Image: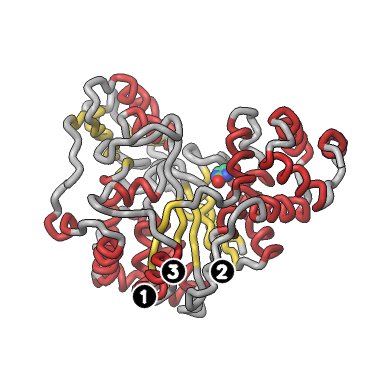
Amino acid sequence: MRMVDIIEKKKEGLELSGEEINFAVQGYVSGEIPDYQMSALLMAVYFRGMSRRETADLTMAYVNSGDRADLSKIRGIKVDKHSSGGVGDKISLIVIPLMAVLGVPVAKMSGRGLGHTGGTIDKLESIPGFKTELSPAAFIGNVNRYKMAIVSQSANLTPGDKKTYALRDVTATVDSIPLIASSIMSKKIASGADALVLDVKVGSGAFMKTLDEARQLAETMVQIGKDTGIKTVAVITNMDQPLGHQVGNFNEVQEAVEVLKGKGAEDEVAVALSIASHMAVLGGAFDTFEAAHAKLRKILDSGAALDKFAEFIEIQGGDASFIKSGEAVRKAKHDIAVKSDSEGYVTAIMAELIGKGAMLLGAGRKKKEDSIDYSAGITILKKIGDKVEKGDTLCILHTNLDDWTGAEQTVKSAYTVDRNAPEKIKYIYDVVR
Ligand code: URA
């Protein structure tokens, strides 16, 4: 088999066989196939697309390129969730304790943040002492005992995807639905879940800018789930503005605590309860979404999930005392108010620019090797639909850096204030199963 023939075939719009897809992925991981040939194939896929069968084969080629977690010793249906990437998205921190209260095991492998989107591992590591490196035995033991554990993604999980994703980033081939779908699903399959709820974001802060594209991505991932034996439900949710009021690392943890006290922002609670309810049904705790939703709402209001969150932190070596004391154990040196230049209604907040602003304040990484400041971030005071007067504070920047001008400009440019009130936005658009 020759890579040039595979490229030619895809260039002509023909369907690749499973053997050809495996040959390309294995050869690329081993270094026999150079970047320039894989780049050409990716661009051909970008323009020609992939059939359902090819997409499933690509997913499994990525899975088989590295280790696959063996979670067979965990009792019960292991349910995972994944977000296609958002700003202010702390839903994982909320659903892990919620599932533990119900006794649905969550064995989570997560990544770190890059660019304008954050990562669950960074958020949890902002809690003093919290450890995300666990041996496989400790990870499995914790899930069996406490129904919840998280570990940072193993270096050798889906190396085929890892290497290809880095190449896609520099060859303008990220935004291809079969490539995104196989990339996300391969990591979830390799990390050993039995069932999966996908939070597919659509809007200014997401990969998918239109509902149509988001639906296509959701359908493709649900099909991969069906073709590979993972029960999958995708919820399409709004990312036209950051989720909730906090963006950053420790301040997102603090906001998750508010949600777990039953006091969360409307959008955050709506999305968290929807994702958690689908997880609860897939995990066998309820027969219907409605029954799960009603119970989870009660759990939030009762404080039971907050106690579980404190337990989760302690099990993983962290200090949960900030929950009771309310102490901001990570506090930035500067708080800078970003004010409105005009009066009217907030009609748009470009989530991607808020994420970029947070990164410039120190909360995120430009490059993988960069270190991050857990106390940096943004508190969003005004959200879409809110009325503002000239001079009102739209949001507050938190940073330890002494020059925040670039971040301030970026964040300010994210806001649109208009004389006319916008229509009420939907938080959840659709569910694909
Ligand atoms: N997230 C991933 O893991 N892969 C993609 O291709 C896009 C988003």
Check disc 1 and report the residue beneath it: 145
Amino acid under disc 1 = Arg
Residue for badge 2: 194
Position of residue 82 measured from the top left corner of the image (x, y, whole percent)? 50, 55
Q: Nearer the viewer, residue 62 or 391?
A: 62
Closer to the camera in the image, 188 or 263: 188
The amino acid sitting under disc 2 is: Asp
Across and down, in percent, residue 322 comes to: 17, 55
- Which residue was labeled with disc 3? 140
On screen, residue 286 versus residue 374, left or right, reads: right
**N-term-proximal mark, 2 vs 1:** 1
The residues bearing labels 2 and 1 have C-alpha atoms spaced at a distance of 18 Å
Q: Is residue 98 above or below residue 234?
A: below
Q: Quadrant of the C terminus?
A: bottom right
Q: Is residue 262 above or below residue 47?
A: below
Q: Residues within 10 Å of mark 2 (few under 14, many from 20)?
A: many
> Residue 344 is drawn in which quadrant?
top left
User: What's the residue at 48%, 78% (across, down)?
Assistant: 75
How packed mark 3 is, by other alpha carbons closer than 10 Å (few <14, some 14-19, many 20 or more), is many
